[in-house]
Amino acid sequence: VNLYEWIEDQPEASRYFQEGMIAITRFVEKDVLRKITLPTTAKRLLDLGGGHGAYSIALCQKYPQLTAVIFDGAQALTTGQAAIAGAGLTARITPQIGNFVTDPLASGYDVVLFFNIIHGFTPEQNIALLCKIKDTLNPGGQVIVLDQIPGVSPLPLQETIVRLLSLSFYHLLGGRVYSAAEIKGWLQDAGFAQVQRRNI
């Protein structure tokens, strides 16, 4: 059973899961934000699978000109809507219920967040999703991919955790952790240029 499909029918489990994601986000958020540089011309952000809203909220707070759409399942967005309201950003951040794999995505975005998604899919599915993302972007737009990457952790324990996560992703989602080289190849196959890697 795919974890994300199962959790859509489990309101309490979904809330606990999203609260766990928020806790992890708070732990790394400052480091992530330091690595993201958006041009002043960036006005529209699409956050795929970012139901809890933490990254969209943080980026809208950092960039006053930015508005965001968070595209995720209904259960995930329940948590996100409360967080958006709590941050006073309901006028700038719009939750949109949907399945970004099967549903069409609007165009006209300047940046797309693809955070903690790729480990849940096969390489072929990830290439297809990145091609779909590219079609949503304005010329010069960017996609930002955040995920666990094997082989970059400075400590053996951290590397072991990443490998254990990979095994969990395989059993729960049918995916795994992927190397930076694999991800770069997918981005290039999808037509992205100037691919940069920034470790946190």
Image (spheres, grey):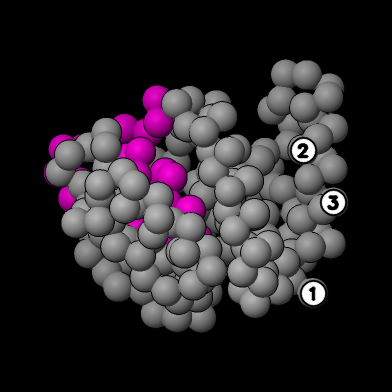
**Residue at the location (48% across, 58% down)?**
79
Disc 1 + disc 3, Cβ < 8 Å: no
Q: Sequence order check: which comes first, mark 3 or mark 2?
A: 2
Magenta region, residue range? 33-59
Q: Position of residue 90 (x, y in %)?
A: 25, 56
Q: Position of residue 30 (x, y in %)?
A: 45, 26
Q: Secondary structure at mark 3?
A: helix
Q: From the viewer's perspective, is the residue at label 2 or at label 1 nearer? A: 1
Within-10-Å neighbours for mark 2: few <14, some 14–19, many 20+: many
Q: Sequence order check: which comes first, mark 1 or mark 3?
A: 1
Report the quarter where the N terminus lies. bottom right
Kind of residue indicated by mark 2: Val
What is the spatial separation of the Cα atoms under label 2 and label 1, in whole angstroms?
Answer: 22 Å
**Residue at the location (79% across, 30% down)?**
159
Whether residue 45 is visible to the viewer of this picture, yes or no, is no
**Residue at the location (78% across, 45% down)?**
165
Query: Badge 1 is on which residue?
Result: 1
Within-10-Å neighbours for mark 1: few <14, some 14–19, many 20+: few
Q: Position of residue 198 (x, y in %)?
A: 50, 30
What is the spatial separation of the Cα atoms under label 1 and label 3, in whole angstroms?
Answer: 15 Å
- The quadrant holding residue 134 is bottom left
Q: Secondary structure at mark 2?
A: helix
**Residue at the location (82% across, 53% down)?**
168
Q: Is residue 56 magenta?
A: yes
Closer to us: 141 or 158? 158
Query: Badge 2 is on which residue?
Result: 162
Query: Badge 3 is on which residue?
Result: 167
Q: Is residue 1 above or below residue 29?
A: below
